[in-house]
Image (cartoon, rainbow, N blue to C red):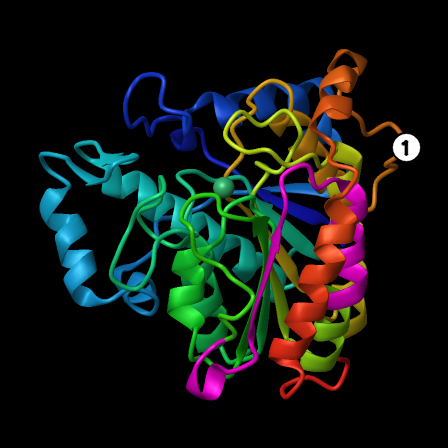
Amino acid sequence: MRTGIVYHTDYLLHEQRPKHPERRERIAYTLDLLDEEEIWEEPGIKKIEPRMATEDEVLAAHNEVYFNYLTGIDKKGADIDINTYGPPGFLKGALLSAGGAVCAAEAVFSREVRNAFALVRPPGHHAGRSFGGGFCYLNNVAIMVRAVQNSGYKRVMIIDWDAHHGNGTEDIFYEDPDVLYTSVHQSSLFPGTGPVKDAGYGEGKGLNINMPVPPGSSDNVYRYLMEEVIIPAGEEFRPDFIAISAGQDNHFTDPLTSLALTARGYADMMSEAVALSDKLCNGRLTAVLEGGYGVEGALPYVNLAIIASLAGLDLSGIREPASYEPLLRYEVNDKALEITKKMVSKLKKVHSDYWNFI
Ligand SMILES: [Zn+2]
């Protein structure tokens, strides 16, 4: 079985304003590297054409008032928040991004591919039921998850490892008894949400697991959280499908954040997620690109690492150019694991009533 990559040249069209970090080079540089590495010629890789998400698919995650607002500002353009401008005609790109995520999941469920990576933009995880922001208009992962649920596979686990907390995704699934949302994010970064104590509400109580980590957290911190929290929670929850909000802005070269994950760290984390999906849900897993703004030093290598892990390719050569190594040494915080262990003991107190693995 192959790994699907959803991609369309129209993903290069969206531009908020010149020099905005969420720019077309994020994907263009990745494509250059994928061409260089002859990824499209790999027998284990299949390119998937996206389509735009339908209104019904959008309204399964967002409310009508918000969608009407987006439709209303689409013609002339408008600022959605201080960092997010919707230029005229932006909605088409947002719908193609969300539709790309839906197509990735459809290809996985039809067994056309084993798993898939939606290489889409604009990103989505800061868009909630009734709001956008943080470079996001529509929540691609949430729209995909609702489409999967509406096709009959109710239980979904979301692993959100973007450096920023996915406040939009949390908002959409906060009371959902069938969606486990897990987020690892840099503490106190935009949008300022995501404390350990926010654990879900009503029937969704215990199914929102927030893991804020300190600046300088590197591969060992993410490995620890996968093994100590994310994998055991997944094994106990037993999802039908695993969705990954694959933000690549926790890479040590990212200009907007202060985390220190390496391309190899991403590859290992994705390999663990793939192994979890094999164990729990017949390998059904889709990763959707979220943030990531180190267009030269990070994104191409991290995206390649993720694709290689999904496809089970050789990971031994996955690394950034050696010239970036001094920066990695500068970014890593040796105390990060110790601080994270304290955070996890607090998390276990918050979640002890809801989980047997704790
Ligand atoms: Zn981010």
Q: Quadrant of residue 225?
A: bottom right
- Residue 268 appears anywhere in the view: no
**Considering depth in this image, is 250 or 7 the residue closer to the camera?**
250
At which x and y percent is residue 139? 39, 55
Badge 1, how many Cα within 10 Å: few under 14, some, many 20+? few
Spot occupied by residue 246 in the image (x, y as percentages of width and height): 59, 47
**Element type at mark 1:** loop
Question: How far from the left and from the top, in percent, is residue 276?
Answer: 77, 65
Residue 119 occupies quadrant: top right
Q: Position of residue 262 (x, y in %)?
A: 74, 33
Q: How many marks?
A: 1
Q: Is residue 38 above or below residue 202?
A: above
- Does residue 317 appear in this view? yes
Look at 56% across and 66% down and name the residue there.
Answer: 196
Left or right: residue 89 compared with residue 118? left
Q: Looking at numbered disc 1 in the image, what kind of residue is underneath it?
A: Ser
Q: Which residues are magenta?
A: 200-229
At x 30%, y 64%, the residue is: 129
- Which residue position holds label 1? 316
Asked whether 220 falls inside the magenta stretch, the response is yes
Q: Dividing the image into 4 quarters, which one contains the N terminus?
A: bottom right
